[in-house]
Amino acid sequence: MTPPAPVALIPADLWPQDVEDLVRLGRPYDGGYVVPRSALMAAQVLISVGINDDWSFEQASTGLNPALRLTGVDANTTASYVLRRGVRFRVEYLLACLTGRRAKRDFLKTRMPSLFAYRRFWAQHTLILKMLAPQASATTVRLAELMNSPPGPSGEPTSRVFLKIDIEGAEYALLEDIVAAGPRLTGLTMELHDVPAHRDRVIQFFAALRPHLVLVHLHANTYGGVDPGTSLPKVVEATWLSRSLVTGYLPPAQALPRHGLDQPSKYSHLPIQLCRANDSAEAETTVKSSACATQ
């Protein structure tokens, strides 16, 4: 018997609005992101912070909008790192084939980066081997610096940027910089870690983005699970759309995860169902039912 899917309770002020043009871009499971098509089509530049060994989202985004100028940022995404990861996953894939673990084999098939593909893709785009930080240094770069480069074809500053951030918890040092960039963003997708521990900061961050960006999607990363004390997901993937691209009323989103778009982070994980709390106090209670009674 299949166990029931985990359930997390989301405060009303963190609940997304519904848009019709959401698309999933990137590889299956962890590594794909659900974003508004209109946000990418309206952008001049895609700034992607946190690449690791997977540039499938970036490749799909530039395929969707070939006019996008891509800047990737990650100190770890070196040729030697990609080579090591590729070898490791190919060995695991071979073992899965030999032991008849079909589900794991199919999962690993999407996770075998090649040095050839790395060099071919990033030869066409900009890859900065640094980390994003509040202050620039020999090993770090500031978001404000990225927002102003590369310039447009005529030398003018870039005015429309889609921003992706997935940096494993380091995002909290950058919240003010992200808010400051808000007026120039066509869209934003980012992963927020340790949400229960940073609950108040997350709520304040979402509120600070609201004048310029509309929250249009929320998904719980299943590697994190649900915090039993607060019923909040430990890790969320959130997506926003520029208010300048919104026409008309956007109703609240209904069922989350969204069927046909969201996927668990691993083939063996159950999806985490998100339920909307009527107020912030209710989000402190523990969810004991798989039904979203507060919807």
Image (spheres, grey):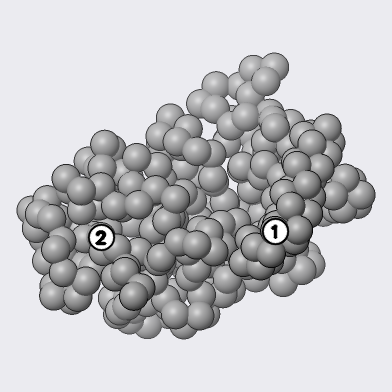
Q: Secondary structure at mark 1?
A: loop
On screen, residue 60 above or below 135: below
Taking depth in this image into account, of 91 and 185 the one nearest to the observer is 91
Residue drawn at (25%, 60%) of the image? 8
Nearer the observer: mark 1 or 2; the answer is 1
Taking depth in this image into account, of 192 and 4 the one nearest to the observer is 4
State the CA–CA distance, disc 1 to disc 2.
36 Å
Q: Residues within 10 Å of mark 1 (few under 14, many from 20)?
A: few
Residue drawn at (83%, 32%) of the image? 80
The outermost residue toward the top is: 138
Rendered location of residue 83, percent (x, y): 83, 39
**Image side of residue 59 versus residue 224, left or right:** right
On screen, residue 97 above or below 208: below
Rendered location of residue 216, percent (x, y): 40, 68
Where is mark 2, residue-wise?
Answer: 8
Where is mark 1, residue-wise?
Answer: 99
Rendered location of residue 88, percent (x, y): 75, 42
Residue drawn at (53%, 39%) of the image? 167
To which quarter of the image does residue 65 belong? bottom right
**Image side of residue 62 versus residue 172, left or right:** right
The outermost residue toward the front is: 99
Res. 266 visible in picture: yes
**Image side of residue 264 versus residue 67, left or right:** left
Q: Secondary structure at mark 2?
A: strand
Residue drawn at (13%, 75%) of the image? 293
- Please name the amino acid that badge 1 sits on: Thr
- Please name the amino acid that badge 2 sits on: Ala
